[in-house]
Image: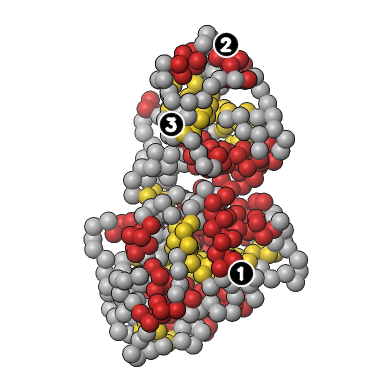
Amino acid sequence: MPIRLSARQADLASLDVPLLAIALRKDATLTGPLAALDAALGGALGRTLQRRDFRGGRDETFHVVGGAKGPQRILLVGLGEPASMPNALRRAAAIAARAAHGAGAGTMAWFDGAADAASIEAAAVGLQMGPWEYTETRTPPPEPDRRAPLESATIVSGAPGASAAVERAAALGEGIALARRLAMMPGNLCTPDYLADTAREIAKRHGMTVTVLGRAEMEKEGMGSFLSVAQGTPQDPKLIVLEHRKGPKDGKPLALVGKGLCFDSGGISIKPADKMEYMKFDMCGGAGVLGAMETIGRLKLPVNVVGLVGATTNMPSGTAVKPGDVVRSQLGKYIEIINTDAEGRLVLADVLSYARRFSPAAVVDAATLTGACVVALGHTATGVMGNDEALVREVIAAGGRAGEVGWHLPLFDEYKDLIKSDVADIKNSGGRAAGALTAGMFLKEFTGEYPWVHLDIAGTAYSESDLGWLRAGPTGVPVGFFVEFVRGRAG
């Protein structure tokens, strides 16, 4: 559950809180409210800076004991020399809130001196992301060893619109927390049925329409590509559709599409055993759609949005699809399956085709699609490609506002030669060369009737190591991409 947030103007020295976090640039000086706080602390902050015990580097922290009155503890957090102040504040606030949570503070205050709404919102989002953890399948520690969780945070600001910015951040924090929770759940708990139930709960909370197609309904739709992935598992696959209709009655919707592979063993082309447990994260695209729809519903954005999630598991069995099999997609194209571990694009092909019935103004899909994208961009940037250059730029800009970095990758016509088949219209893998791009080119074959962008989040949706400002595990990407894109279109 994200923490409770508020914003108010206050004298820093008189704040009666267990912890006050202060964000400072590299080699900052104390002025205004910080100078007054320093005086109340007998110059402790000034001496800390003068001695260069704290220099304000990115992610740097320093604890100062408070005085007899006011904040009990003060945590200085460094911003470095940021290119983007909102993104730096989001990261620093996450570090501060995570420290407060670990210390058992229960509540905290945050001050950074920001006066613009974007920076206030970013810090408020960070305050929610930092302390997040998944505890549902862990036994609580003995009572004497427990620390109070961080339950609330106050942003100290008198800037116009601060409270509204915090409210928007709270809605975004709820969506990110939902996506991270779904992603972190073990695969035996977060099943296609569970994702469908989650969508129904979102729809009930926010007055949306929900439609769920199972195996029988997808067979009637002719979704042979999607169903080929699901034919090796006894779990019923689900195509989940959430509709948020708050825009003009005749307005074309924006469509958000997510890959929801609740576990990906690779199928017959089975993955190595080492680190296969991370394949529960192969539904982060779908989790991102559900998280985004939660935020969109909370914000009551005046726009029409359709969220689509293709959910199943990819398992080896006597009925599983085999390399060399040919299946017919909903669009009518025949697909030769070269590698059963290239399953996400098979699911998305039919979901992207199904999206045509909504006559979307634009479609953005997100998927942990290729290891090749991780090789190309590491864990820093999401690969972005599509059939509309203006939409690609729009989505990358939206991600930048949300602190989710995207990098434009090409879909040159020549890449299609790599996925030509001798026995079908197209094959699902072009080999190792340009692997992220041939996957994108495959998806493009099913998107010709609308502007479309694909986000390959294989390297950014989760982290196998602790990032400092976030724990190891799901990062919340691509909720920010989705929400900021929709907010930008909502005006």
Amino acid type, callout 1: Ala
Q: Give me the C-alpha separation between circle 2 and circle 3.
A: 25 Å
* Precedes in sequence: disc 2 or disc 3: 2
Give the quarter of the image for residue 183: bottom left
Visible residue check, residue 65: no
Q: Residue at x 56, y 68 (%)?
A: 389
Mark 3 residue element: loop
Residue at left offset 36%, top offset 55%:
378
Residue plotted at (35% across, 70% down): 434
Q: Do tag 2 and tag 3 residues touch (Cβ < 8 Å)?
A: no
Could you tell me which secondary element the residue under label 1 belongs to? strand
Residue 385 image offset from top left, x and y in percent: 48, 67
Residue where numbered disc 2 is placed: 40
Circles 3, 1 touching at the beta carbon (< 8 Å):
no
Q: Amino acid at mark 3?
A: Gly
Q: Residues within 10 Å of mark 2 (few under 14, many from 20)?
A: some
Report how many numbered discs are placed on residues in the image. Answer: 3
Which residue in the structure is indicated by mark 1? 362
Residue 213 appears at what percent x and percent y?
53, 74
In the picture of the structure, the residue carrying the numbered disc 3 is 57
Q: Residue furthest left?
A: 273
Residue at point 57% right, 55% down?
397
Amino acid type, residue under disc 2 in the picture: Ala
> Would you identify the image quadrant in which residue 234 lies?
bottom left
Determine the residue located farthest toward the bottom in the rendered image: 423
Where, quadrant-wise, is the C terminus in this rendering?
bottom right
Between marks 3 and 1 in the image, the one whose residue lies nearer the viewer: 3
Can you tell which quarter of the image residue 292 is in? Answer: bottom right
Distance between mark 2 and mark 1 Cα atoms: 55 Å
